[in-house]
Image: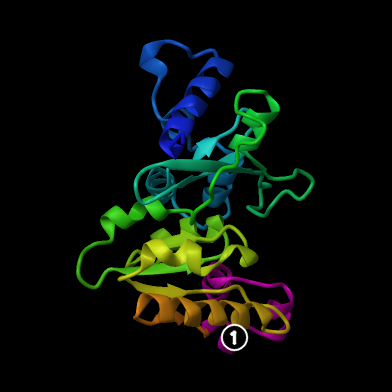
């Protein structure tokens, strides 16, 4: 059976050919060749006051943010073994909110469409930022998990005492996705909503993970306690709460 890293070696060659970089010196991991702070997302982080230029650059390097040819940010999913699983391409407006007129996409999907990966190839997604576990081995090191990649990037500079990871969606959390975090101090920060459903669902998954891991996985209730009705209706997250309160 072909291993994931072998498949992605093929992916790197395919994308390299597509970009016209088929020389040996360009055969680097895909995220390295797309690394950029020039996406609209990175620019908006600074323009909207979420980060200074220095913080944005540091966070972009930390998460290895990339840029697509049409200006979208690429949130690479790189696992704890440094295997690039896939890359989510997303588009943001100047106000640092999602551009809902442009649908997100995936690097592997684009490669399949271009005939550069087999039609039946399926990437195995993981938590965004999982490669940071290599830096989270010290005593007292804590892992925080949020929903959006944007929030993980922002919080990594606002609250650097945690290693911030993201699920990429409220329904993307599962015990399987959390398995690489076994043996570590983990706290989940679900987005809020009017009904509290997201909090309850993440709490159930945290309880299931705790049973499997043999140690507690904590769920923060800060948003449920502090967010106003209007904020809950807007489904704010932990980064929103901090900046709205400042």
Q: Does residue 236 appear to the left or right of 8 in the view shown?
A: right
Query: Residue 124: x and y, percent?
Result: 53, 48
Q: Residue at x 58, y 54 (%)?
A: 48
How many residues crowd mark 1 within 10 Å: few (<14), some (14–19), many (20+)? some
The residue drawn where x is 50% and y is 69% is 175
On the question of residue 12 being in view, the answer is yes
Toward the left, the furthest residue is: 139
- Judge whether residue 101 is colored magenta: no
Q: Nearer the viewer, residue 201 or 142?
A: 201
Q: Give the percent coordinates (x, y) of residue 200.
A: 61, 83
Q: Residue at x 48, y 74 (%)?
A: 188
> Which span of residues is magenta-colored?
222-246
Query: Who's the residue at 32% across and 68% down the image?
Result: 161
The quarter holding residue 196 reads bottom right
Q: Nearer the viewer, residue 7 or 161?
A: 7
Q: How is the image coloured?
A: rainbow
Looking at the image, residue 153 lies above or below residue 4: below
Where residue 61 sits: x, y (%)? 39, 43
Residue 163 is at least partly visible in this image:
no
Q: Which residue is mark 1?
A: 224
User: Mark 1 falls on what kind of element?
Assistant: helix
């Amino acid at each position: 059976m072909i291993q994931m890293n072998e498949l992605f070696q093929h992916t790197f060659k395919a994308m390299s050919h597509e970009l016209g970089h088929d020389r040996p010196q360009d055969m680097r991991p895909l995220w390295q060749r797309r690394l950029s702070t020039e996406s609209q997302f990175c620019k908006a982080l600074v323009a909207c006051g979420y980060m200074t230029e220095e913080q944005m650059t540091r966070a972009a390097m930390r998460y290895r943010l990339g840029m697509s040819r049409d200006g979208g940010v690429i949130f690479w999913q790189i696992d704890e073994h440094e295997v690039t699983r896939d890359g989510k391409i997303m588009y943001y407006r100047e106000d640092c909110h999602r551009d809902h007129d442009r649908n997100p996409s995936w690097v592997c999907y684009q490669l399949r469409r271009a005939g550069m990966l087999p039609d039946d190839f399926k990437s195995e997604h993981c938590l965004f930022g999982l490669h940071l576990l290599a830096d989270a081995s010290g005593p007292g090191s804590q892992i925080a998990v949020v929903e959006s990649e944007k929030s993980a990037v922002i919080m990594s500079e606002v609250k650097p005492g945690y290693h911030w990871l993201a699920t990429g969606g409220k329904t993307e959390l599962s015990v399987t996705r959390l398995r690489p975090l076994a043996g570590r101090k983990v706290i989940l920060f679900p987005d809020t909503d009017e009904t509290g459903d997201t909090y309850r669902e993440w709490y159930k998954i945290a309880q299931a993970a705790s049973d499997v891991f043999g140690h507690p996985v904590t769920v923060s209730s800060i948003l449920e306690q502090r967010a106003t009705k209007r904020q809950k209706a807007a489904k704010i997250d932990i980064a929103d709460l901090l900046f709205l309160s400042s």
